[in-house]
Amino acid sequence: MDGQTSVARVPMNEIAGEEVVQVSINGTGPYDFILDTGSNVTIMRSQLIRKLNLPSGAPIAIVTATGETRGQRVIIESIAVAGLAVDHLEINALDRVQVLNGRVQGILGENFLKNFDILIDNEQQTLFIDRTSILEGTVAGERLSFSRFGSFDYKPTPDRIVIKLKVPSFMGKPLLFLVDSGINTAALYPPPGGQALRALQSSQHVNMSDLNERRDCQIQKTTLEIGGGTFRGLELVACEGLTRNKMDTDGLLPTRVFHRFFISHRGGYVIANPRSLEKLGDPFAQLGRDK
């Protein structure tokens, strides 16, 4: 790892509705990758694997926010964002990925991001990434603990960011939602049987893409209760075929519905809409400028 850089300020560019950051692989690039805390692995196009002459390995199951697909495991020497690197990282190669449009070459997932604390600033379209505790000292707000595991078929799914929240219009008890920077709309995975989808019958129909297919979905406005905060007027989608028995959480919480979203992998908590600490001036404006 680069011993000089500890915190970096990285532009996020919107490409086909996705927030994209630039990634270096084995010192080459940069390449455009979708920032995706909802994917527990980092994914890249098979064409790029071949271009870089990286040896491919055995087939592997890839677990994402919308299900499971198959790819090939590749171990790369180094992957970095703005000089912040992780060595010997497992990447999964896919030949066809629905969500990868145009020049986008891959998905930067949690097996990379978990090595850092990150602040996603949607207002400034900026990602702050920190391998120390500097970033943590610049933000304040309600700390919501998260679990690092989802649960599917009574087995844990690693490298997840799962928090408890409530959807009052659907169920009174807390639900487990995956924090997902790779989607624009909150998603609900209802119990099988169709009751939740029937409750959304007055809502708007939309089509949504996951890694390898498009799905028919219904969307409506709802309220989410997250910690002590109430967030009204958020869109919530439920899709045919995506029910709780097929997924490892009850739903998805997009980071893009917040002004800013802080994830402390080191501390095991998130802060929705953190505020900057006044005693430090304007840390959001200063972080990463001395890189």
Image: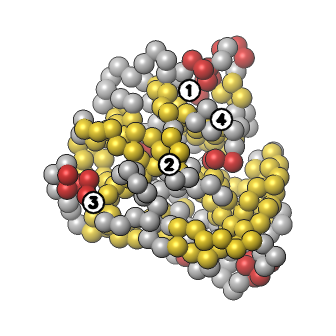
Residue 178, percent across and down?
60, 57
Tell me the colour scheme of the image: secondary structure
Q: Residue at x 39, y 45 (%)?
A: 32
Q: Mark 1–mark 2 contact, CB under 8 Å?
A: no
Element carrying mark 1: helix
- State the mark number for residue 135: 1
Q: Residue at x 63, y 60 (%)?
A: 252
Query: Mark 4 vs mark 3: which is more N-terminal?
Result: 3
Between marks 4 and 1 in the image, the one whose residue lies nearer the viewer:
4
Q: Give neighbour class at mark 1: few <14, some 14-19, many 20+ (Cα, 10 Å).
A: many
**Would you say 76 lies left or right of 213 here?**
left
Element carrying mark 4: loop
Between marks 2 and 4 in the image, the one whose residue lies nearer the viewer:
2
State which quarter of the image contains the N terminus: top left
Query: Mark 4 vs mark 1: which is more N-terminal?
Result: 4
Residue 62, percent across and down?
39, 65
Quick check: can you spot residue 35? no
Between marks 2 and 3 in the image, the one whose residue lies nearer the viewer:
2
Q: Give neighbour class at mark 2: few <14, some 14-19, many 20+ (Cα, 10 Å).
A: some
Q: CA distance from mark 1 to mark 2?
A: 27 Å
Q: Where does label 4 land, which residue?
A: 123
- State the mark number for residue 46: 3
Q: Mark 4–mark 3 contact, CB under 8 Å?
A: no
State which quarter of the image contains the C terminus: top left
Element carrying mark 3: helix
Q: CA distance from mark 1 to mark 3?
A: 35 Å
Query: Mark 1 vs mark 2: which is more N-terminal?
Result: 2
Note whether 92 is above or below 243 in the view shown.
Answer: above
**Looking at numbered disc 4 in the image, what kind of residue is underneath it?**
Glu
**Looking at numbered disc 1 in the image, what kind of residue is underneath it?**
Leu
Query: Mark 1 vs mark 3: which is more N-terminal?
Result: 3
Q: Where does label 2 land, which residue?
A: 15
